[in-house]
């Protein structure tokens, strides 16, 4: 097999691939662990250039299962130039910053409370054969807006490309402590949990929480047949392993914990994951989800709640699945179709949603961005406009009983004239604020079945399928429908035989 020449000339394509790997796939700055100092990409290139030049075709052959030579080169470089990523909860004070780790302040940084945590992380990185390590405390020059922007946009990719992600759960001695572990409540740690291909959890006093070198691939799971893995991870018996404990706590399934694919699909589920997490900066509610949804958006601290609106606006432009509207509570000050924060998605009862989604077979109707599905319910051409969200839906007139928080739909059983019998459908509507008794109200069906529309779209047949609805009131001044805020997700869940009710099939702006 051909190898590198004796005069030090590198094998074909390796230096170009190395340059691309360092400058496009590695973090902007890293800790060079042997010297505990920060290095930029240029220094990384210089440090590892001799080792990369020495790579032979025999080395490349070890990764020969790839689709192309370029992919082989990437894999051998990833193996040769390894870096570790750190996932942890910041201390209130005393974390070493980029400035603290600079040459002039390096000695002073050693007295900071967080420096011990940083050195322990670097020690664990060395155990995984990583001489390069990244921590968000000191590897970003936050005085540079361009560097901060790049770091936030690329962070998911960096965690995905790391040789190992070291997670430090300072308040946990075992998985039984996970319910009280702050790490699981923070916004940024969601992508730090989902992105890495390989991850190791350490608890209080840096004791490993398992005997496995990779907690995303525990030995019991790695040796189990594929058809037994889901039952193994969900088994309620015995002391749960780390993945089981995380699934129970977060609702994130095994496949997503071990093989998460970012993008704008299964949006409602992913927003539910984020709904119980918090961030120190309000803008980070949105920025911490950029990698999860694989989108690009400008970073602007000081933007406040508008950053969340901008994120959801991008998602709504590409997501065509109606369940993104299954939320309740306060809406964004910029649009009534968007919740004020991800917490709106926590208002929906988990068990109800599982039953709801199974009844409508959501797993088969939703597709990734760009894929057309003619079986999708509702108006899958809904779009954000300068007037708000534009959507075409059937509106069912209701009588709203404010004291009892019930909206009644006057319906009838199908049949010819005298055979048709009246039947009322009560729907729970917990209004968020005062609703005038004099207003005309209606329910707009978000996930309507086009087959349910009858008599030239003037009637809708309500069958057994649960229907997700918006609650509207008619504005007496301009005679337009205004969405009303509710504390519950409104569902018409009719159990009996089909009934028909009058409807108005209209385009509304929310």
Image (tube, rainbow, N blue to C red):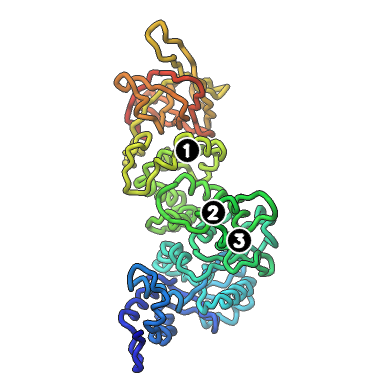
Q: Marks 1 and 3: in contact by CB < 8 Å?
A: no
Instruction: Measure how far apart labels 3 and 1 are at the Cα level.
Output: 37 Å
52 in relation to 170, above or below? below
Q: Is residue 16 above or below residue 446?
A: below
Mark 2 or 1: the one toward you: 2
Q: Nearer the viewer, residue 409 or 266?
A: 266
Residue ranking furthest to the top = 418
The residue drawn where x is 34% and y is 35% is 379
Judge left or right: residue 246 versus residue 68. Answer: right
Q: Position of residue 284 (x, y in %)?
A: 49, 56
In percent of width and height, residue 54 lies at 40, 87
The earlier-in-sequence mark between 2 and 1 is: 2
Measuring 47% from the left and 40% from the top, which residue is drawn there?
A: 331
Tally of numbered discs? 3
Instruction: Determine crowd level at label 2: few under 14, some 14-19, many 20+ residues with C-alpha closer than 10 A.
Output: some
| Residue 117 locus on image (x, y percent) | 62, 71
Tag 1, which secondary structure? loop
> Which of the two discs, 2 and 3, sits closer to the camera?
3
> How far, Cα to Cα, is label 2 from label 3?
13 Å
Quarter of the picture containing the N terminus is bottom left
> Looking at the figure, which quarter contains the C terminus?
top left
x then y, percent, for residue 352: 55, 36
Q: Residue at x 49, y 39 (%)?
A: 327
Q: Residue at x 43, y 80 (%)?
A: 44
The numbered mark, 2 or 3, whose residue comes first in the sequence reads 3
Mark in front: 3 vs 1? 3
The label number, if any, that marks residue 254 in the structure image: 2
Q: Is residue 451 left or right of residue 217?
A: left
Residue 220 is marked as 3
**Which comes sooner in the sequence, label 3 or label 1?**
3
- Judged from the image, the secondary structure of the residue bearing numbered disc 2 is helix
């Amino acid at each position: 097999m051909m190898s590198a020449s004796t005069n030090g000339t590198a094998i074909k394509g390796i230096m170009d691939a190395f340059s691309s790997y360092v400058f496009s796939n590695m973090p902007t700055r890293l800790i060079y662990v042997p010297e505990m100092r920060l290095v930029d990409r240029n220094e990384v290139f210089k440090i590892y250039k001799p080792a990369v030049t020495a790579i032979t075709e025999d080395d490349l052959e070890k990764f020969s299962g790839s689709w192309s030579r370029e992919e082989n080169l990437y894999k051998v470089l990833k193996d040769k130039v390894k870096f570790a990523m750190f996932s942890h909860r910041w201390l209130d004070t005393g974390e070493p910053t980029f400035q603290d780790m600079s040459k002039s302040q390096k000695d002073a940084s050693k007295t900071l409370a967080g420096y011990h945590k940083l050195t322990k992380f670097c020690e664990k990185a060395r155990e995984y054969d990583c001489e390069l390590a990244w921590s968000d405390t000191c590897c970003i020059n936050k005085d540079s807006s361009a560097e901060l922007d790049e770091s936030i946009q690329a962070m998911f990719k960096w965690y995905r490309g790391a040789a190992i992600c070291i997670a430090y759960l300072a308040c946990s001695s075992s998985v039984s402590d996970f319910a009280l572990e702050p790490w699981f409540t923070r916004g940024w740690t969601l992508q730090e949990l989902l992105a890495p291909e390989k991850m190791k959890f350490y608890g209080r006093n840096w004791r490993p929480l398992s005997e496995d070198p990779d907690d995303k691939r525990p030995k019991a799971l790695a040796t189990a047949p594929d058809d037994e893995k889901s039952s193994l991870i969900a088994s309620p018996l015995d002391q749960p392993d780390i993945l089981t404990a995380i699934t129970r706590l977060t609702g994130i399934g095994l496949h997503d914990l071990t093989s998460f694919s970012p993008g704008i699909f299964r949006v409602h589920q992913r927003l539910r994951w984020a709904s119980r997490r918090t961030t120190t900066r309000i803008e980070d509610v949105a920025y911490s989800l950029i990698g999860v949804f694989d989108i690009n958006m400008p970073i602007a601290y000081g933007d406040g709640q508008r950053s969340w609106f901008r994120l959801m606006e991008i998602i709504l432009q590409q997501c065509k699945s109606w369940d993104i509207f299954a939320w309740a509570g306060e809406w964004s000050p910029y649009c009534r179709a968007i919740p004020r924060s991800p917490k709106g998605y926590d208002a929906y009862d988990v068990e109800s949603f599982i039953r709801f989604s199974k009844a409508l077979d959501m797993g088969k109707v939703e597709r990734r961005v760009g894929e057309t599905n003619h079986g999708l319910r509702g108006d899958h051409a809904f779009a954000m406009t300068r007037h708000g969200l534009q959507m075409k839906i059937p509106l069912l007139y209701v009588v709203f009983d404010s004291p009892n928080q019930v909206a009644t739909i006057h319906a009838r059983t199908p049949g010819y004239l005298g055979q048709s019998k009246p039947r009322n459908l009560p729907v729970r509507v917990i209004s968020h604020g005062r609703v005038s008794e004099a207003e005309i109200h209606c329910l707009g069906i978000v996930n309507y079945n086009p087959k349910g529309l009858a008599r030239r779209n003037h009637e809708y047949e309500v069958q057994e399928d649960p229907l997700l609805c918006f609650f509207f009131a008619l504005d007496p001044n301009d005679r337009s429908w205004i969405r009303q805020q509710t504390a519950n997700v409104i569902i018409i869940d009719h159990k009996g035989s089909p009934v028909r009710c009058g409807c108005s099939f209209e385009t509304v702006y929310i």
